[in-house]
Image (cartoon, rainbow, N blue to C red):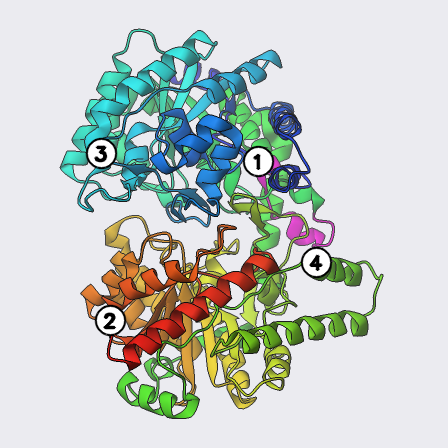
Amino acid sequence: MTEQSAAAAARATVYGYPRQGRNRELKKAVEGYWQGRVDTAALRETAAGLRRTNWRQLADAGIHEVPSGDFSYYDHVLDTSVMVGAVPERHRAAVDADETQGYFAMARGTQDVAPLEMTKWFDTNYHYLVPELGPDTVFAADSTKQVAELTEALALGLTARPVLLGPVTYLLLAKPAPGVAADFEPLTLLDRLLPVYAEILADLRAAGADWVQLDEPALVQDRTPAELTAVARAYRELGGAADRPKLLVASYFGRLGDALPVLAKAPVDGLALDFTESGAANLESLAAVGGLPGKRLVAGVVDGRNIWINDFEKSLATLGTLLGLAGQVDVSASCSLLHVPLDATAEGDIDPEIVRWLAFARQKGAEIATLARALAEGTAAITAELAANRAALASRAASALTRDPAVRARAAAVTDADGRRSQPYAVRTTAQRAHLRLPLLPTTTIGSFPQTTELRTARADLRKGRIDTAGYEERIREEIREVVTFQEKTGIDVLVHGEPERNDMVQYFAEQLTGYVATRHGWVQSYGTRYVRPPVLVGDISRPEPMTVRWTSYAQSLTDRPVKGMLTGPVTMLAWSFVRDDQPLGDTARQVALALRDEVGDLEAAGTSVIQVDEPALRETLPLRATDHAGYLAWATESFRLTTAGVRPETQIHTHMCYAEFGDIVQAIDDLDADVISLEAARSHMQVAGELAGHGYPREAGPGVYDIHSPRVPSAEEATTLLRKGLEAIPAERLWVNPDCGLKTRGWPETRASLENLVTAARAIRTGLADGGS
């Protein structure tokens, strides 16, 4: 095919789209179902309506081929487990009795049955449900969901491409099921899984699918020769099947490396690759293997993870180069648009100058369609769009909103000494124990307490002028008093104020720092029905005035026990925001760290003796390739130390991390030089405690004993069992007792019961240790 005919064939497509709806209709329907207010039929109708709306938006924007099957009530990896019949035995009865209730039982657990483990989806803030597999796992095809959603799209007269999680990535994301040897490799089940995928592909072909997309994002990570051999075997078998649709293998979030030649040689019909900055090496690698002659290439030139407008001229230059490397070149985003908000035009509160620079999912769809039209018809077809794009890019580059000379001068003056505590940990811990006088196995929580309907209503009432500031603040004081009273009565040793004034652990701070812009409708799915509004990092960062001191000091005035000051750390402030792309992340992190350092100093000056700086995103932001780890961890750990190092030795610095795989960053956790770290551990059965012990981690740690992402209440006996397991790895004098994460999403009844059981467990083990037992 000539370059001219390849250009004429150019089409616009996307891999996936936000699920929640303009007003988070899916969240409301699912939570209504859990509460018994919405029945199964109404839930399904809401979901079908959202899918129709999404497809029509895409088609209206000029997208020629829409995705199907990417929609999920909770998580697409969980959907894949259902599709291949990998339902844990403990959930089998629930699934057989009612497939919808059983599905949510796997996601959330029940009082009697634990849910699947949850962790981060590669280096994003999306969480997936980890498949549990073992040598006895029996797979069975269930294409019902995929076929039904394809049929819906085709009935609208659309060209639709089903999207499935690929078999290799699915197995690489899995873990050994409970009771299975820890060294079991789920990838050994590949030959058992492939016939199931072949059956599903045949079902989709029979239902009218011309193309099916198989997502293999795990291939942008470092993969062993054995794993690459498995990739070749998988696509040799699936590609060689007689009764199949055309196969498009998609990988994203970075460069493919050694996996690219394997896929290029596979008997599949096309590849979808990332050609944004993170995947720029894919172009060179594709040329090195001789391209994809006679095959389809879907070029991800629009950033699917950030919200800045595309540089059309730069993207068209990349697309022009790619025309000579494939039989057909189509245009897409670099990954699913699940990771960005829905529509920037809804943000009426943001400066119009800034809105010009933003592209959410709907705008990205239009960008993709514009680029595809230019590729097919020539740039003369998009003259007006090119002019508007150049003007918007120039506006951002020249704007005074993006630069603050004072902030830059302060960051440039930072020295190594600014990131070091005045005394080593061995000296600090003695001073802290004398100052705080805490018992063995001290109990605490991670920070937030339930955000009740009353609190959310009060916040909305203040925003809409139905109550004044004085009335709102009295409501906050009442909530803090209730939280402090409950903690004292329950017997918790280190208290928190509960964070009733905070809408989100990042947005709350972003709204008080210069350089950030908060959205009103920019919701992005984090997990299940949990949506967040990542703020937009537009310019240089500074802190005009204290952000947390007032409410922390008020809580401390209500009790003699220590109350933790609670801050979100610099890495998480970046990871859970849409970051600027016009300077290195490390430079931005240093600016945020200096602003937070001022807050830490003010907390300490106000009498706060325990300060927690949360960094749950430290692991999730770790680059996917090992060769990129050192550079990232250097600035990430430096920014944390820069935030915390200015305090006195007797001030205890805590940090918190959750829902990620921590084993490969234990040295970085050590390098933070925090006095205490709390970590998620309940769903992973104290795995992280062993990882800390294996590293020789010398400081105090609180591996969680209460899974806060499930509504179930862990018994005192269950918490005791987990604590005993923790004590096998961490000495009692360095072990803390706490939940996995903050309690914002939980209700008060389950929170009360769970924390009471947590304290009971800690006291029981303290008594045993005092009596000489364990």
Badge 2 or badge 4: first in the primary sequence: 4
Q: CA distance from mark 3 to mark 2?
A: 31 Å
Q: Position of residue 414 (x, y in %)?
A: 40, 79
Give the spatial CA distance, label 2 vs label 4: 40 Å
**Which of the labelled discs sits on residue 579, or is there none?**
none
Earlier sequence position, callout 4 versus callout 1: 1
User: What kind of residue is marked 1?
Assistant: Arg
Q: Residue 513, how many percent across, how many down?
A: 60, 69
Q: Who comes first in sequence, dot 2 or dot 1?
A: 1
CA distance for labels 4 and 3: 45 Å
Q: Quadrant of residue 231?
A: top left
Residue at 55% across, 88% down: 560
In the drawing, what numbered circle is on residue 456?
Answer: 4
Q: In the displayed structure, does residue 180 sit left or right of residue 491?
A: left
Which numbered disc flags the more N-terminal residue, 3 or 1? 1
The residue identified by callout 2 is 697
Closer to us: mark 2 or mark 1?
Answer: 2
Q: Which residue is mark 1?
A: 19
